[in-house]
Amino acid sequence: MRIDLLGCPVDALTMAQTIARVEDAIARRETVQHVAINAAKVVRYQHDAALREAVDGCELATADGQPVVWAARVLGRPLPERVAGIDLMLRLLEVSRDRGHGVFLLGARAEVLERAEAEIKRRHPGVRIVGRHHGYFGRDDEARVVDEVAAAAPDILFVALETPAKELFLARNRARLAVPFVMGVGGSFDVLAGERRRAPRWMRRSGLEWLFRLLQDPRRLARRYAVGNTRFMWLVLRDAVRIRLHPGAAGRG
């Protein structure tokens, strides 16, 4: 079931259900695009028409951040669990090793990408990486990169670019890529390569993953989190008040 969270679509799926949807897409050779929904993306969705169109076109949209799960509960549209993008990627790599799915890695710096691939192979011996390409290419080179991915014929494409670059890249090129399952994975290659650390499990469960990231990169993230998190809380509060005044609004979407 797909819910409406502050106008943004989120699928009420467990991790197991999400994996099953991906497996079905690969079996059917259809194209399914996944988007990870976090607080920052919900806020940007409100005013960024290009991102909104790309997100609306995705067949799978899961709750990447714990605040999204909490907000859905507050607004009377509960989600079964958090399905974070990096966790989904790691699970799909495990599935790919077992099922023989081909995986293409796109994004990050060349040296980071190389280390990320080595770590994936260390964790999942036998996984079939059919290609990789760094993420530092411009629009003039985009068609060539898309052709390279398509020629490798992967079953799964992971795109490690920032928001909204990854969503827009996939929305523009999904037909030419012809990959059954495509998803943006943000900074996940940096984590695999050891460039960045992931928050401890207790911080993720407590909704404090943003704080852990902020402490690692305060110069880049301070303003984004200060403005974005405040805006997200305001949007949730506004919708909660609206639902309280008009109870019939709860659960729509």
Image (cartoon, rainbow, N blue to C red):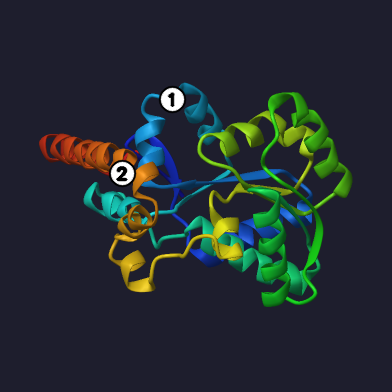
Q: Residue at x 75, y 74 (%)?
A: 98
* Left/right of residue 58 with respect to residue 32 in the rendered view: left
Q: Residue furthest right?
A: 151
Dividing the picture into quadrants, the one containing residue 118 is bottom right
Marks 1 and 2, how far apart in space?
Answer: 21 Å
SS at mark 1 in the image: loop
Task: Classify residue 158 as left or right of residue 3.
Answer: right
Task: Work out which quarter of the rendered image holds the C terminus and state it.
Answer: top left
Residue 17 visible, this orientation? no
Task: Please say if the residues under marks 1 and 2 sit with CB atoms less than 8 Å apart.
Answer: no
* Residue drawn at x 88%, y 44% as measured from the top left: 151
Q: Amino acid at mark 1?
A: Asp
Residue displayed at 78% across by 38% down? 177
Q: Position of residue 42 (x, y in %)?
A: 37, 38
Residue 48 coordinates in the image, percent (x, y): 43, 25
User: Is 103 placed above or below 251 here?
Assistant: below
The residue wearing badge 2 is 222
Q: Position of residue 209 (x, y in %)?
A: 35, 59
Residue 9: quarter of image: top left
Label at residue 48:
1
Between 149 and 4, which is closer to the camera in this rendering? 149
Kind of element beneath mark 2: helix
- At 79% from the left and 37% from the top, the residue drawn is 145
Q: Position of residue 183 (x, y in %)?
A: 62, 48
136 and 63: which is toward the camera: 136
> Between tags 1 and 2, which lies in front?
2
Count the numbered circles shown.
2
Please state which amino acid type lies under the numbered disc 2. Answer: Ala
Q: Does residue 190 appear in the picture of this structure?
A: yes
- Say which label, 1 or 2, has the lower sequence index: 1
* Nearest to the observer: residue 113 or residue 168: 113
